[in-house]
Amino acid sequence: MLSTWLKIGLRSLLRNRLHSLINVMGLAIGISACICIFSLVNYEMGFDTFHPDSDRIHRIYTSFSGSFEGTNSGCQTGLPPEIRSTLPQVEELAHFLTFTAKAWIPDSPTENKDLGIQRDIIFADPAYFSLFSSYDWVAGNPQSSLSSPFQVVLTEEKARKYFGLENAIEGMGREILYGDSLRVTVSGIIESLP
């Protein structure tokens, strides 16, 4: 019975080649479009879902145009006070900027260990860890790790890479030099991000 249906279907396809080609191409394009749309939506909805209440967290980013074009994952310094004053429904706000700089580890007064250009640096205010509370702390704590200027929180992976340590906790209190003048002290270490 099945072989008869296949023969009839194949004869019909061969008899009406143009009509069959249009139908098969339309079906293939439709299925491909559905797969592409599903993949895109799944990719966009899959970011930072490990944070509690991730569906209630929104992000503002900066887009530059003119002589310098590009984007920054954070926002400029003047925006958070304006958001706090004009949008009372905002429960918590954490301001941060992304930054790229050459990093150094001061080994001795005369020689520094060059870490190369680091592209994933974030300048954040202390509210960052109260908004994103899902980080697992290896050393330090979210209340005091960014309470003073010139403090940095590293992942275990970065602490091991920067200082060449087997135990990342030994990196606490050590210094990192970004650019040529931004000297920061490690005040916290979190587990590597998922």
Image (cartoon, rainbow, N blue to C red):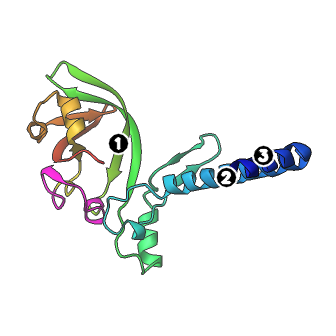
- Residue 129 is labelled as none
Task: Determine which residue is flagged by label 3.
Answer: 7
Closer-to-camera residue (41/172) = 41
Q: Name the residue at 36% across, 76% down.
A: 91
Q: Amino acid at mark 1?
A: Ile
- Residue 31 is labelled as 2
Among numbered discs 3 and 1, the one appearing first in the sequence: 3
Closer-to-camera residue (180/187) = 187
Residue 137 is inside the magenta segment: yes
Q: Residues within 10 Å of mark 2 (few under 14, many from 20)?
A: few
| Numbered disc in front, either 2 or 3 | 3
Q: Quadrant of residue 182?
A: top left
Element marked by disc 1: strand
Residue that protrudes farthest toward the bottom in the picture:
88
* Segment tinted magenta in the rendering: 128-144
| Numbered disc in front, either 1 or 2 | 2
C-alpha separation, residue under disc 2 versus residue under disc 3: 25 Å
